[in-house]
Each structure stands twice: as structure tokens, then as C-alpha cells.
């Protein structure tokens, strides 16, 4: 907490603003990613149960990333995006549609992770 405050104090006002904006966008992106994987898991449980373990693992990564950004925001004076509901809504639909319409997309996730051949 003190290290973050000291780091911010060493920056110009403009640089501090950039740091806050970067944190805000990254936090929102992780929020959307959580919804993407959540929706993909809903489809995968019915259609591709073999990759659910990997999707669950990746969802866990996104949850940790989200927590890390959330924790970094407060000591730097960054506030969450006001449009978080759009990130959630957009992420969920993106995940659902890519999983539902693009069977190969989900298989690619698994292939990238070395789960399928
Ligand atoms: Fe992430």
C-alpha cells in the first residue's frame, strides 16, 4: 500500500492519470473475461465436457487477475469503470456465442492448452 502510494507520488499528475486509466481498463477487461469463460463453461458442460477442466482453470486465472487489479486500484486512487455492466453483458454474450456457434473456438482453447490433439 505504501509502496503504491510512493510510486504514485513520484509520478506527474498526467502519469498518475494514465496509471489510473490503465488499471480501470484492465480491471474491466478481467471482469469481461470472467463472464466470457463463465458463459463458455455453460455451453461446454453440455457440448464439450472434455474441456471444462481447462476452462475452469482459465476462469480461475481471470478471477485472480481481476482481484489483483481490484487490489491495485484503491491505493492508486483508481475507480472501477462506470460501465461494468456492459463489460459483463458483452463478455457473457461473447463467450456464449463463440462457444455455441464456433465449436472450433472452444477446441482451440483446449488445443492451446495441450488438452486435445
Ligand atoms: Fe486475465
Image (cartoon, helix red, strand yellow):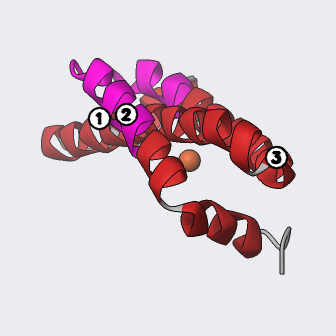
Instruction: Check disc 3 and report its element: helix, strand or loop.
Output: helix
- Quadrant of the image for the C terminus? bottom right
Distance between the Cα atoms at labels 1 and 2?
Answer: 12 Å
Q: Quadrant of residue 10?
A: top left
- Percent from the top left, x then y, of residue 101? 46, 55
> Ligand 1 closer than 8 Å to the CB at disc 1?
no
The residue positioned 67% from the left and 38% from the top of the image is 41
Residue placed under numbered mark 3 in the picture: 49
Front of the two marks 3 and 2: 3
**Residue 112 located left or right of residue 96:** right
Q: Residue furthest bottom?
A: 117
Magenta region includes residue 81: yes
Circle 3/circle 1 CB separation < 8 Å: no
Q: Which residue corresponds to mark 1?
A: 20
Q: Which mark is residue 28?
A: 2
Query: Would residue 30 appear left or right of 91 to someone viewing this image?
Result: right
Q: Is residue 114 above or below residue 64?
A: below
Of callouts 1 and 2, which one flags the residue occurring earlier in the amino acid sequence? 1
Q: Nearer the viewer, residue 87 or 30?
A: 87
Secondary structure under badge 2? helix
Q: Say which of 60 and 22 sits in front.
A: 60
Figure disc tally: 3
- Left of 91 or right of it: where is 12? left
Q: Secondary structure at mark 1?
A: helix
Residue at image position (43%, 33%) is 92
In primary-sequence order, the first of circles 3 and 1 is: 1
Determine the main secondary structure of the stretch shown in magenta. helix
- Against 50, is 10 above or below? above
Where in the figure is residue 24, as x and y percent of width and height? 32, 33
Residue span colored magenta: 69-94
* Disc 1 crowd, CA 10 A, few/some/many (<14, 14-19, 20+): many
Based on the picture, tell me whether residue 91 belongs to the magenta stretch: yes
Amino acid at each position: 500500500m505504501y509502496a503504491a502510494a510512493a510510486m504514485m507520488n513520484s509520478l506527474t499528475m498526467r502519469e498518475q492519470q494514465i496509471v489510473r486509466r490503465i488499471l480501470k481498463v484492465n480491471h474491466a477487461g478481467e471482469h469481461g473475461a470472467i463472464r466470457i469463460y463463465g458463459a463458455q463453461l455453460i455451453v461446454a458442460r453440455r457440448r464439450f465436457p472434455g474441456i471444462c477442466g481447462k476452462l475452469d482453470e482459465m476462469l480461475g486465472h481471470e478471477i485472480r487477475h481481476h482481484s489483483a487489479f481490484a487490489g491495485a486500484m484503491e491505493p492508486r486512487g483508481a475507480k472501477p469503470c462506470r460501465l461494468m455492466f456492459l463489460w459483463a453483458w458483452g463478455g457473457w454474450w461473447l463467450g456464449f456465442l463463440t462457444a455455441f456457434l464456433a465449436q472450433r473456438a472452444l477446441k482451440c482453447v483446449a488445443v492451446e492448452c495441450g488438452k486435445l490433439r
